[in-house]
Image (cartoon, helix red, strand yellow):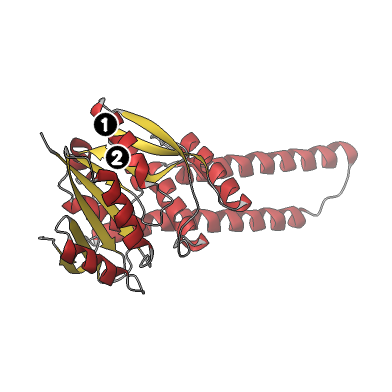
Amino acid sequence: MTQKISVVVPAFNEEKNIPLFYARLKNIFANVSKYDVEMIFINDGSRDRTWQEIQKLAHNDAHVRGICFSRNFGHQIALTAGYDIAQGDAIISMDADMQDPPELIMDMLEKWHHGCDIVYARRKNRKDGFLKKLTAKMYYALLNNVSEVDIPRNVGDFRLIDKKVLNELKKCREKYRYLRGMVAWVGFTNCFVDFDRPNRVNGETAYTWKKMIKFAMDGFTGFSMFPLKIASYVGVFVIMTGSMMFLYVSYDFLLNSTPYPLYKWLVILVYIFIGVQFILMWLIGEYIGRIHDQQKERPLYVIREGINYVA
């Protein structure tokens, strides 16, 4: 029996990579008759000819489906749009920059046939700069220590999920999306396919430091209450250090008759409390802002046009 496979590919300024990606994917499935493969490309507000390249492929191949956003909504939202229209028994999400090797798909499908509902492509190494490697390692170590969900390390958004996993994932409609955590949250059996991550073929990464910081915040606030608990840790620390200073001043004043101008210590303590208040106000404001945005109930994305796509 033929099984339907959906390949979801978000794209931002990937006009040179789209035809190369399509050719490699077609070559992989060229002699495999047991799969009916649909390719879903999501143009996430690209400023180049990415959408024209997707349209060109879709006109020549009915298995290619395309969505064009009205503006840039972000990588995770683009993946969500692809998931929303995917019709496959298994859904594979990956980027078009060739850093997610399409040749790995067959290994992922084999694991899926052996009963894995989620198959993660796990990076054995990554050819990023030292700072990016270090910050990524520190971030995922911290996230896993404070998160209520066990999120696999060294995996990105290159993964296969079974249709039943997708059905549960589609019920989650929060605006600030961290799909790596959401996929882990729904549960089900999972396994890994390891690979060496190559460099980009064309273009530059769309993940700037600003976007990575926002992405990291989405992970923390979406899957951990740790930022809110910082308030209690800081409060205990301030009370303890304040008590120790008070005891020291009292001891020195009563036993050694050392004069201490109390206002100096009070100024220091007030200054510390002002800093603590600003930190806590920022953390509380972050959560309140996200609650505010979520309650607006705006759509996650706006589609300007589509090809081989029916809403």
Q: Secondary structure at mark 1?
A: helix
**Residue shown at 25%/44% (left/top)?**
29
- Quadrant containing the C terminus is bottom left
Residue 84 visible in this rendered orientation of the protein: yes
Residue 149: name its quadrant.
Answer: top left
- 142 up-or-down from 71: above or below: above
Q: How many marks?
A: 2
Lateral position of residue 86 relative to residue 76, left or right: left
In the rendered image, residue 176, in percent from the top left (x then y), is placed at 34, 54
Can you name the residue that lies furthest to the top here? Answer: 114
The residue labelled by disc 1 is: 112
The amino acid marked with disc number 1 is Trp
Mark 1 and mark 2 in contact (Cβ < 8 Å)? yes
Lateral position of residue 68 relative to residue 224, left or right: left
The amino acid marked with disc number 2 is Leu
Q: Nearer the viewer, residue 34 or 266?
A: 34
The residue labelled by disc 2 is: 160
Q: Secondary structure at mark 2?
A: strand
Classed neighbour count for the residue bearing mark 1: other residues with Cα under 10 Å, few (<14), some (14–19), many (≥20): many
Q: Earlier in the sequence, mark 2 or mark 1?
A: 1
Q: Nearer the viewer, residue 2 or 305?
A: 2
Q: Which mark is residue 208?
A: none
Residue 110: name its quadrant.
Answer: top left
In the rendered image, residue 307, in percent from the top left (x then y), is placed at 16, 65
- 7 up-or-down from 211: above or below: above
